[in-house]
Amino acid sequence: VPPKADLRWNVGLFLATAATVFISGYLFFGGVVGGFEYLGTLFGILVTHEASHFFMSRRHRVAATLPYFIPSIPPIGTFGAVIKAREPFKDRNQLLDIGLAGPLGGFAVAVVATFVGIFTSPLIPLQEASHLSSLPFTPLLMYLVTMVYVPANRVITLNAIAFAAWVGLIVTFLNALPTAQLDGGHVLRSIVGQRLHSSISLIVGLAVIGLGVAVNPGFLLMGFLMLFLSYMGHPGPLDDYTKVSKNRFVLYALWVVLLVLSLPI
């Protein structure tokens, strides 16, 4: 039986991250109301993500920690959260189910937040938008929704809910990429062997670093982290020979849809 975890770290990091996220919303979205809107929306995405991992682990009877949230400086306020399995995965079905549960849960909330945020964000005339700065990239889902909703002579200024959805979609995309022991890496490892997994992880890490150089430096840290983690490999499940059950292949399709719709463009 795995040793009992010290929950003080989980609680402390949760409170610290809630504080940094609230401060981000407070500073950039008009005070207390903006702070709570940003905190509630972003934590709705992150907590659903981590709870989906946790309860899927419980369903498969795999011991797992509670999430460790990671605070950050404004304007984002967090680097997300991590949850650790405290024992090896038994087979590839477990690896797929537990790895993909988090991104799917968080993505579902991010989709709702995207529509709510876009439809409640103010629209201003195009000629009045020259002083505004634009985001360096936009998740495909958010781009499509704004294309349909925002008239050609208007510009949308994202409110706290919409910006939290933007952050949630980007975090979901990066986490679901097929690399290392991130969630997408678990999904990939449920399909392929260790050697191919290591090669793909390396390529994805280099690609994210390329995004950091060509698009936005914010990707650099994540890219180097992926590169570092890819060298550590992935142990895979205890039963590394039995393939994933056929009825789970719909989950791979959902994984691809998630990656496409959250893709930053």
Image: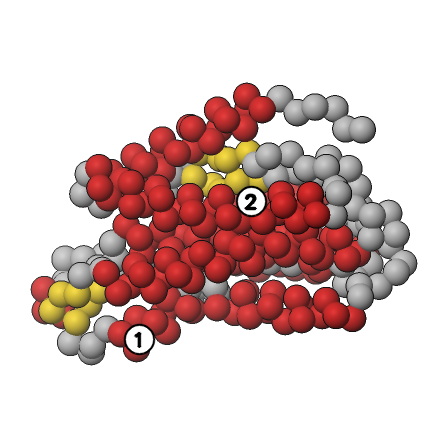
Task: From the viewer's side, name the closer residue of 203 and 31.
Answer: 31
**185 displayed left or right of 71:** right
Q: Which residue is mark 2?
A: 50
Q: Residue at x 71, y 70 (%)?
A: 249
Q: Residues within 10 Å of mark 2 (few under 14, many from 20)?
A: many
In which quadrant is the C terminus drawn?
bottom left
Q: Residue at x 60, y 34 (%)?
A: 66
Task: From the viewer's side, name the closer residue of 264 and 68.
Answer: 68
In the image, what residue type sits under mark 2?
Answer: Glu
Q: Earlier in the sequence, mark 2 or mark 1?
A: 2
Secondary structure state at the residue bearing disc 1: helix
Tell me, for residue 159, which label it has, or none.
none
Q: Residue at x 48, y 24 (%)?
A: 12
- CA distance separating discs 2 and 1: 31 Å
- Examine the rendered structure and indicate whether residue 61 appears above or below residue 19: below
Q: Which residue is mark 1?
A: 147
Foreground tag (2 vs 1): 2
Residue 7 horizontal/vertical position (percent): 58, 24
Total marks in image: 2
Secondary structure state at the residue bearing disc 2: helix
- Examine the rendered structure and indicate whether residue 153 appears above or below residue 189: below
Q: Residue at x 9, y 64 (%)?
A: 128
In the image, what residue type sits under mark 1?
Answer: Met
In which quadrant is the N terminus drawn?
top right
Can you see residue 181? no
**211 displayed left or right of 130:** right
